[in-house]
Image: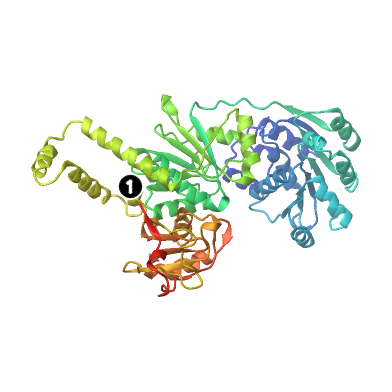
């Protein structure tokens, strides 16, 4: 069995791409299948999802492609659109340094987009049998140059009634093609299919590798792709990790997330393969000493890290393989300490996440995303607990004398409140508001809310230095203050603390932003979406004299 991917004869561009993805050594299914397919054999592989089979057939296919031939040379059939997308994305990541085109083809997607891609020419087609057969009947795709056909999760395609479609598709491919069949089970119809359409196939059987998962708390949040960063910051504010590693899939993502966290005053550092050893040592020195609480890294960069006191591991991007997931979360919960592993899962990654859990033998708990109110409550509880710890410790005598002296002028409650206020003033400006009550306004009911046809504004003017903006989305669109704050902070890169009062009416909303950044906010929001809706933003018009005082929204809190 090959101990490295280089020993399997893969080219330098492919080796470079998979190294960046964190692939260290081939799994048993990869080692056997890559060698067999590279030697031109047909393959019947019985292996569970999560054993690394996508790379097992993708890597040798890539090595055989002719980049100059703009025609399908490989066809991969999958039972579902989710798997088709996942396999296509894997091919794209493996061909990062090569001029190879990959097209996922499945139902539910506009066929015009697929037709345009096929006209331009692609080398790899990944799709569901129904849509592939549809293209064959339309004569919009030809497989005369196909060298390799892969039937992925053949038993699932059998269960979904695709066997006849598969046979019809195989008849449209050259007889001298190479065929690879992957299936977790081998029912008789699949065995008969293999007998009819494969030639002296090599049989490979690999049991799912038993994995040891650390005894740590594993949770996940389902998030929209556009909301991932905003939800990451919300989770960080809720968890307040003492020391965390945040895993991203690419170096570009590591740099991007690191810069955005630093811009919001999080003590973060980036770590990836492009950094020289001196820079890596400096970053790791600060992380180990506690000067840096958040380390954003790729799998490759984190290889060999030995940091005992990591309280959290956060999978900002899911790994491609279950083994990588186990390696990642093993960075926390060491030496008998408690640890938490958090994964952010987008809707398109549900299947992949299910695969990781099944293969790794874990059952992560799904959690509801914390609200801004949850974050404030958690912060206040932690703040109170830190005060209790200070009281329980020694060394308060000088401060007790000071408190007794001032106690002759003020009540204990006023003294404590003033001290808390001073303490919050020492926090980073962008995050100090997490201990304060957010300024949120709510209007009266629909009958009393100002009519947007008459005016955009309210009777009380914005604070000095602020400009009031009108957004054409409101309560009937289920908009919340947090949605508006998140959109402005994320898209316009303005700290949440800089945003002023927010009013939400039935059909529109008003928000006060710094006057010198109003145009920046308008420009950014015009290109974004709130609650999955495109929005229109403009400077609010002054209130109409006809609007009575009872129309003015009430302040909450």
Image quarter hosting the N terminus: top right
Residue 237, image x and y in percent? 40, 45
Residue 165, image x and y in percent? 87, 43
Residue 65 visible, this orientation: no
Residue 135 visible, this orientation: yes
Indicate the quadrant where residue 442 lies: bottom left
Q: Give the vertical position of 156 relative to 525 (above or below).
A: above
> Dot 1 corresponds to which residue?
435
> What residue sits 47% from the left and 43% below the top?
246
Q: Circle 1 — which element? A: helix
Residue 489, image x and y in percent? 44, 58
- Nearer-the-camera pick, 255 or 421: 421
106 left or right of 547?
right
Give the color scheme: rainbow, by chain, secondary structure or one colour: rainbow
> What residue sits 62% from the left and 25% below the top?
210
- Nearer-the-camera pick, 309 or 486: 486
Indicate the quadrant where residue 38 lies: top right
- Nearer-the-camera pick, 30 or 246: 246
């Amino acid at each position: 069995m090959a101990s490295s991917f280089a020993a399997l004869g893969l080219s330098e561009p492919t080796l470079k791409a998979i190294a960046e993805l964190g692939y260290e050594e081939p799994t048993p299914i990869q080692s056997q299948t890559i060698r067999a397919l590279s030697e031109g054999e047909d393959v019947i592989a019985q292996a569970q999802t999560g054993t690394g089979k996508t790379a097992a057939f993708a890597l040798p296919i890539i090595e055989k492609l002719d980049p100059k031939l703009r025609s399908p040379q490989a066809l991969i059939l999958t039972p579902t659109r989710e798997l088709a997308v996942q396999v296509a994305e894997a091919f794209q990541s493996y061909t990062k340094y090569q001029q190879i085109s990959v097209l996922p083809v499945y139902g539910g997607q506009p066929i015009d987009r697929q037709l345009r891609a096929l006209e331009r020419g692609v080398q790899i087609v990944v799709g569901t049998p129904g849509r592939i057969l549809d293209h064959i009947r339309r004569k919009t795709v030809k497989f005369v140059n196909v060298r390799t056909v892969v039937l992925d999760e053949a038993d699932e395609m059998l269960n979904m009634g695709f066997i006849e479609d598969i046979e019809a598709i195989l008849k449209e491919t050259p007889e001298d093609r190479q065929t690879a069949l992957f299936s977790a089970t081998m029912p008789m119809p699949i065995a008969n299919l293999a007998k009819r359409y494969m030639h002296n196939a090599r049989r490979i059987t690999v049991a799912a590798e038993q994995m040891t998962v650390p005894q740590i708390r594993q949770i996940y949040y389902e998030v929209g792709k556009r909301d991932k960063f905003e939800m990451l910051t919300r989770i960080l504010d809720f968890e307040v990790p003492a020391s965390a590693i945040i895993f991203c899939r690419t170096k570009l993502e590591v740099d991007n997330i690191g810069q955005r966290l630093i811009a919001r005053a999080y003590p973060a550092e980036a770590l990836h393969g492009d950094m020289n050893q001196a820079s890596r040592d400096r970053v790791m020195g600060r992380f180990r000493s506690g000067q840096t609480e958040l380390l954003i890294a790729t799998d490759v960069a984190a290889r060999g890290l030995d940091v005992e006191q990591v309280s959290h591991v956060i999978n900002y991007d899911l790994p491609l393989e279950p083994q990588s997931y186990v390696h990642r979360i093993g960075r926390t919960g060491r030496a008998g300490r408690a640890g938490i592993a958090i994964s952010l899962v987008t809707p398109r990654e549900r299947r992949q996440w299910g695969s990781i859990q099944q293969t790794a033998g874990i059952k992560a708990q799904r959690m509801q995303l914390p609200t801004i109110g949850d974050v404030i409550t958690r912060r206040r509880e932690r703040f109170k607990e830190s005060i209790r710890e200070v009281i329980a410790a020694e060394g308060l005598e000088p401060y007790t004398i000071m408190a007794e002296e001032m106690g002759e002028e003020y009540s204990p409650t006023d003294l404590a409140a003033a001290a808390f206020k001073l303490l919050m003033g020492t926090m980073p400006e962008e995050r100090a508001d997490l201990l304060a009550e957010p300024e949120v306004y709510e209007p009266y009911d629909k009958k009393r809310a100002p009519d947007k046809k008459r005016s955009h504004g309210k009777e009380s003017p914005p604070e000095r230095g602020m400009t009031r903006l009108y957004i054409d989305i409101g309560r009937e669109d289920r908009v919340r203050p947090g949605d508006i704050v998140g959109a402005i902070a994320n898209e316009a890169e303005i700290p949440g603390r800089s945003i002023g009062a927010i009013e939400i009416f039935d059909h529109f909303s008003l928000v006060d932003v710094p006057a010198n950044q109003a145009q920046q906010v308008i420009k950014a929001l015009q290109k974004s979406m709130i609650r999955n809706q495109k929005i229109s933003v403009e400077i609010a018009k002054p209130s109409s004299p006809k609007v009575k005082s009872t129309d003015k929204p009430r302040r909450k809190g």
